[in-house]
Amino acid sequence: MWASREPRSLSDVAYLAYVVVLTAFIVLGPGIRALWLLATGDAGVAALSDPSVPATWAVVSGCVWLLALVAGVERGPALRPPFLTGVLGDADASRARAFGGPVLRATVALVAAGAVAPLLPALALVDAGLARPRDVAAIALAGALAGLLVATAWLAGQVLRATTVGWTAVVALAAGVATALVGWWRWAPWALVASVWPGSGLPAASVVAAAAAVLVVVWLGLRGLERVETRRLVGQAVRAQRAQLLVTALDLPAAGEVYRALPTAGRRLSALRQVPGLVAVLLVPVTASVRTPWRLAAGLTTLVAAGAASGLVVPGTALHVGPVVSAVLAYLGVSVVCDGVRHAAALGRVSTQYGCSDLTLLALNGAWPLVAAVGLTAAGAAVAGAPVGLAAVVAALAVGVRVSDALKGPMPVDLLVPVVTPAGDVSAVGRVVWLADGPLLVGAVGVAGGLAAAGRGGLGVVAACVVAMLLWRALRR
Amino acid sequence: MRRRNDPGAPRGVRVELRSAGVELDGTTLLEPVSLSVPAGGTLVLRGANGSGKSTLLRLVSGLRLPTSGEVTVDGAAPAPRRRAFRRLVTGTVEPPLLARDLTLGEHVALVATTWGTPVRDARTAAGALLERLGIANLAHRFPHELSSGQTQLASLATVLVRPASLLLLDEPEQRLDADRTAVVAELLAERREEGATVLVATHSTPLEDALGGDVLRLAARSADTPDHGLGPERHGDDLTPDGGAADA
């Protein structure tokens, strides 16, 4: 009955298939070919056969499972449109039956993604004679199991209480670090793909551990799905629908705002300290950020990880990817302490609310993100033996990009004007670039940082671009 | 309460409109109007929806330029980008933004702090103002925990806690009950007694009566009024300095 409200005709389905096939040929095909050539080249084979690759798979697997668990708190797989979620949630039918469809679709997609993700590197090793075809099958199966664990962790995150998920994530992270330090990680579930990687020499015990983990999490997830409050499911459905509409309208900042945690803790802690005027304003964001403690903890942990990752090098090569990873992590992590920056940016140039100019307010609220980002990434880099100075510079530039994002304002109308070319209307490219200028600039910072780590120039130019963009947006308002 | 003659009290500013009107793409948002509000005076704007009350306030706040005529505040054109102008003017023409991660009490005190009030005094002033508005029990609430009426009172608190020579308020009675509207009227009257100039657009007759002062009634344009801005000018009541009221 619900599906009949938006029926799809045969021509709609045919058009969708046409778009998918064209996208596969035009985008995916050349992309996959480029990756294949990279993987089967000398540098690629050296990187894929490096002894550190199994450990890398373990780290990536563990991180993806943790992220899926945490993501489920805000948006899980068991969702339908808000009205339908409310009706089915309170209906007499079992939740597994009511929400089985979306959960199954998400699970199939993640299992497929898990199976496909390690395939290209594995096939490259077969091509280089370093693996057998049956190794590829084992890797695909292990990847599928890892994908299944992602899906079940995602569902578990949706149905368990948020504090339970938070503490589970903390314990899991601590367990991961502890097992890594004492060398026991090879028996842990996250060593699943690593254990079947050609030449890893790891025991297959992790496969058993992963299978057991899947069973436990599936049981938790299904049991929790029957018990979770309908109100919580409806809340997730409403937020998902709102975010989707905002993304469709190209208002990504507002879409992000939908999922930004609201403050609930620390209301009795005074954010306004008994210090002279502007110093008091400087300290307000520090206390204010404590009011979303889980969000703050995640952000600060990400900043430390950004510093620790800044020294990463592709195994077997001299390719410094650490600064790219560090820049992205710093950009993500510093967001949690930028609420004051967003508030100052939203006020605009002509606000009469505060007794200082908007630029002064912006600078005062930007101090805490800068100190947090630079301090924590430097600390993380120092602990991990990575270049501290480079990590600090990359983090500082990531903060600059964040502030620039806050000052961006609405999309210029000019970008909506069609740009007719022989290939058709390419105005969408301009809109995408405008929307993604923050991540693109962060990527450029990371690449320039990688070049700097290899003793080459370019970081200064990118830094100048970041500063110029920031000043231009601040002064043109 | 500081009196008009108190040397520490903010001085009011004179507001003048001379045939100031706004037309946009052939549509008249505000027919040309001339008025003069003396320093320390009060003007209440009444009129139906679409009559141009908010547009008039936006002209005075400098957020919109007149397409005809002239607007002056304290003898000069409104310049919201200038710090000196922003020091004179406050209001709800652009609704105040509440920081999502500050409690109501902190936010009001923070506003006062940025206007030069020491933190301790700012906390006291914020507490007293919230008490007057009847929302002192909400001082530890975050903005997302406030109802629409409470948010309106919170916005008014951020406006009233700072010093200003000109208050521009657009329907401050929105979402408020009669008792709270009366409190708001009292607070505005006190600011006027302290020397500030007050312009308020409102649909509330009790608020109009409580504020006193002069009233300008803007008539909504009918469908028959041609959209070429050649309608007759309407003049508000000319306000002359009231020496008697200044010494109250």
Image: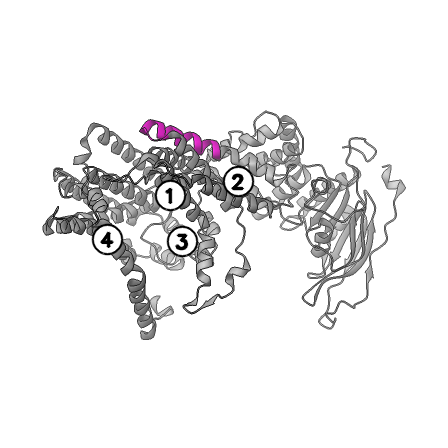
Give the residue type at disc 3: Ala
* Residue A432 visible in the shown view: yes
| Few, some or many residues within 10 Å of mark 2 (<14, 14–19, 20+) | many
Residue range (magenta): A370-387
Sequence order check: which comes first, mark 4 or mark 1? 4
Whether marks 2 and 1 lie on the same chain? yes
| Quarter placement of the N terminus of chain B | top right
Q: Report the mark closest to the observer, 2 or 3.
A: 2
Q: Name the residue under label 4.
A: A37
Secondary structure under badge 1? Answer: helix
Q: Name the residue under label 1.
A: A447
Amino acid type assigned to the residue bearing label 4 in the image: Leu
Instruction: Estimate how packed mark 3 is, as few (under 14), some (14 to 19) or many (20 or more) residues with alpha carbons within 10 Å.
Output: many
Task: Establish whether labels 4 and 1 are both on one chain.
Answer: yes
At numbered mark 3, what does the secondary structure look like: helix, strand or loop?
A: helix
Give the percent coordinates (x, y) of residue A367. Answer: 52, 33
Q: Residue at image x 57%, y 44%?
A: A474
Element under disc 4:
helix
Q: Which chain letter goes with mark 2?
A: A
- Which residue lies under the disc numbered 3? A240
Q: Circle 2 is placed at which residue position?
A: A341
